[in-house]
Amino acid sequence: MAKPDRNLRNFCIIAHIDHGKSTLADRIMELTGQVSKRDMEEQLLDSMDIERERGITIKLAPVRMYYTALDGQEYELNLIDTPGHVDFTYEVSRSLAACEGALLVVDATQGVEAQTLANVYLALENDLEIVPVINKIDLQSARIDEAKKEIEDVIGLDTEGCPCVSAKEGTNIRDVLEAVVNRIPPPDGDTDAPLRALIFDSYYDNYKGVILFLRVKDGTVKTGDKIKAALGEKVYEVTEVGAFAPYLQPKTRLVAGEVGYLAASIKSIEDVSVGDTVIDAAFPDTVPLPGYKKVQPVVFCGIFPLDGSKFLDLKDAIAKLKLNDAALTFEPDNSVALGFGFRCGFLGLLHMEIIQERIEREFNLDIITTAPSVSYLVHKTDGTLLHVDNPSHLPPVSEIDYMEEPIVKTEIYSPPEYMGSIMDLCRDKRGTFRNMSYLDANRVKIEYSLPLNEIVYDFFDEIKSRTKGYASFDYEIEGYEKSRLVRMDILLNGEICDALSTIVHEDRAYVRGRTLCENLKDAIPRQLFEVPVQAAIGGKIIARETVKAVRKDVLAKCYGGDITRKKKLLEKQKEGKKRMRKIGTVEVPSEVFMEILKTNRDK
Amino acid sequence: MAGIYVHIPFCRQKCTYCDFTSFPNRLAFAEAYMACLYKELEMRGKELEKAKKDVVFDTVYFGGGTPSVIDPKLIYGAMNQIKQHFALSKDPEITIEMNPGTVSEQKIETYLKAGIDRFSIGLQTAIDAQLENLGRIHHVRDYLYCTSLLKGQNFSADVMLGLKGQTKEDVEKTIKIAAASGASHISMYALTPEDGTPIYTDYLNGELPSPDEVASLYDFGRELLKTEGFSRYEVSNFAKKGKESRHNLNYWRRGEYLGFGVSASSFFFGRRFTNTFDLDEYMKCVISGFYPVIESEEVAEQDAKFEMLMLALRTSEGISSRKYREVFQSDWKEDFKEAYQKTKKYLHEAGDRTSIKDEFLYVQNQILTEYME
């Protein structure tokens, strides 16, 4: 049995948002001469516009580097970037499976954050060697020793001799590389065994077809080889293999232990799924590598084109995004108010926002999105069970025996002074208190079980505003719980607007209905006639507001010199109208469909 | 029938709401400017003659700025020029706008000699404090003096709505004074705060009445005008029987007109064109024998159709199917079928004519936009 190259290291970086992960990655690449400073765009790994703007990483972006260590030997390093946000835990687990070690970047001014922890535990589960790195030591408020103590107390990692760096200023970056070389083990595997390579990501390229991101565990693969996916049927001939430099750089072969890419004229991403194993077509019985836990979307919303004729463009856009985003799900949806569109499933709210933004930016489409929802379990009186994530698909009350809603286990980390406020909020959101513990004098961990549908509503914003942004939190699905849920409809001028229907807890319906009617009253422009805005459960009206008829909408003067200009004013007004949706006789701007997310406090 | 518009871009001081082309500090240029205007009249007149265009002009309108601020002889001269180069109808309507702070007996005498038979007086409001806020140079007593000089003449008064602090009582007082002064025509405009004018600041600070409040003032004013014997014949215009402004009706009937002077617009030969807004450029052009036109567009048929509707629906006479067919050889209810069906309930139909129902005239943009592509 031949072992892989002893001088190979595959690692990733785990960090909380803005703890400096991308900056550190940039410095490492700079130091290894991977990219000359001049050519380097700020934060090279975050290649999507949205990523760079928001300072977050969504897609995995591997890069290969060479480093001559203090022991005089040259090492090949493969850095696989990971997303920092809790929504993308799935992506993280994929990159972890391709590595032997992880750098845990901790901000010396902030300490360990909740979201980081989730990923650390994932890494530990994957038997990765974790190397803590204290970052931002250049800042005045840096408290290096406290950060180290926190790492030891909270995670239980030894911080003895861990690198303390300033990625921003490039201080002590070599320490990091030495730690990678000395502490992270070289890959395991058998280079003589039949090929087994884990697909940890993929994307579609217009010229080469699907590009698979691989971590070769056993064997080798080269151009001309016949391969197949363990779970697929089709056999492909490899057209290209290579490394990430960080752009695709062809090479003759990929050997066990290495990270790289493979192209084989694969037509569709659906043919070979992420998490599957690439094997030699001559050995179809090769045991596949353990894949990933298939993630289920937890947040759902409807996405509709603003201009109904753009449905096919939207379909195309979502399908393209799906190519590179295994976690995104979608199926056709049809709304009376919004026409044809898609019901999409996401990992979380941020994931949802990002997909919406990408559709608008990268595909230049104006879209309307409906309020986020979760997936409910509906037990019908006839004994059947339904999963309902779209309020309009809820069966009539008479057919429902009872319903269950998803409950999440939430861990909230906060300075102790906000504890009372956080607990009030959780109680408000129908939470059940589980536990509370002091991590140190300045941080408390509060655990609650909360209905997910309360979290997708406005929990994020609330918790940030109540703690001046100091608290962080993380959640995971705990299970389903029986709950008194009802569908609340919104009627505009007497007609139900299906896109505004929501499933709410019975006790919250009245307040939610009133707030929503008030918000809608302000968001719906006044029309030629009075428009009643009502919230109803079943046939019963629970709240009502009125959009008064418009009283003045006229060009005061229109004489000889005005005609062209006034016509333009009308055209402008018409443009605004075109962007509206017609619900029965009422014209409604598209933003209205997001009003449901706003709370009283916003006003 | 066609109209002639003459723009006099001078005034003593700029009003706080004014975004018209006027130059408060350049009165000294008036003579030179008018000389250019005479030349422009002559150029256009000769052009028509050459093209053998037999157009009869039924109205002349001196607008501004403040036409009454310049030497009345210059107005007289302009009228001479017009009579010399254009065919006027037998009984033309010739109007001049006047600021009550700039009139004199001698001025009015000269205007009458020039053939002017209609006066449009900018009263705006009968509350002096509001006049000052508007930057008007006159007081209510000036208006009263001015109209006393116009005894027996046909004149109109301008009234504004939506002024800072304006109440129903203020509007009542204003309309009553206008009516009592002998006006046969009243224009009642809602103030439009334009970006760039001083009053826009008041608007931004929420110091002007809200659109709903303006609508209330308007409804109140409209009722009062009715009892005073003025009927609404256009969104902002009210007249005693037979005293409607022929010049303005021509605009709304989409009739032809020629505009002269800086910033003046024309609709002629199927084109809309506009003169330069720059006084010096205007004069330079005309002196060199060029038209000072900076913008000229032929109105495409679909635009023309919409224009006719948009303008006609401002008036109580509304749109005439017969006239529309004469111009476009089609039926407007067919051309705008969908919009017509949709808005039918807001329309009043009387034989050949369709107009917007009284109660919806002041929200007509909502209806008009349905008729746009």
Image: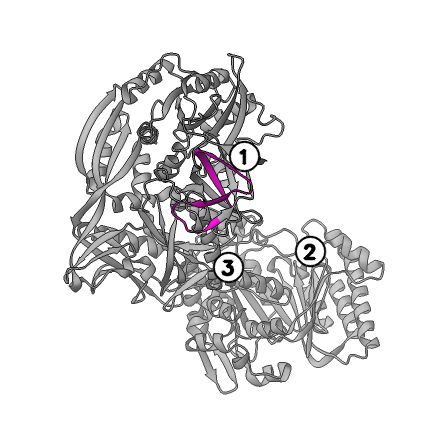
Nearest the eye: A108 or A430? A108
Residue A534 showing in the rendered view: no
Q: Which residue is most to the bottom?
A: B351
Q: Which residue is mark 2?
A: B10
Mark 1 lies on a secondary structure that is: strand
Q: Which residue is mark 3?
A: B125
Amino acid type indicated by mark 1: Arg
Residue A413: x %, y % from top left: 28, 29
Same subunit, tags 2 and 1? no
Residues in magenta, as a range: A210-235
Residue B15: x %, y % from top left: 59, 52
Amino acid type indicated by mark 3: Thr
Q: Chain of mark 2?
A: B
Q: Which residue is mark 1?
A: A253
- Evaluate if marks 3 and 1 touch, with contact meaning CB atoms under 8 Å apart: no
Q: CA distance from mark 3 to mark 2?
A: 22 Å
Nearest the eye: B53 or A394? A394
Q: Is residue A211 magenta?
A: yes
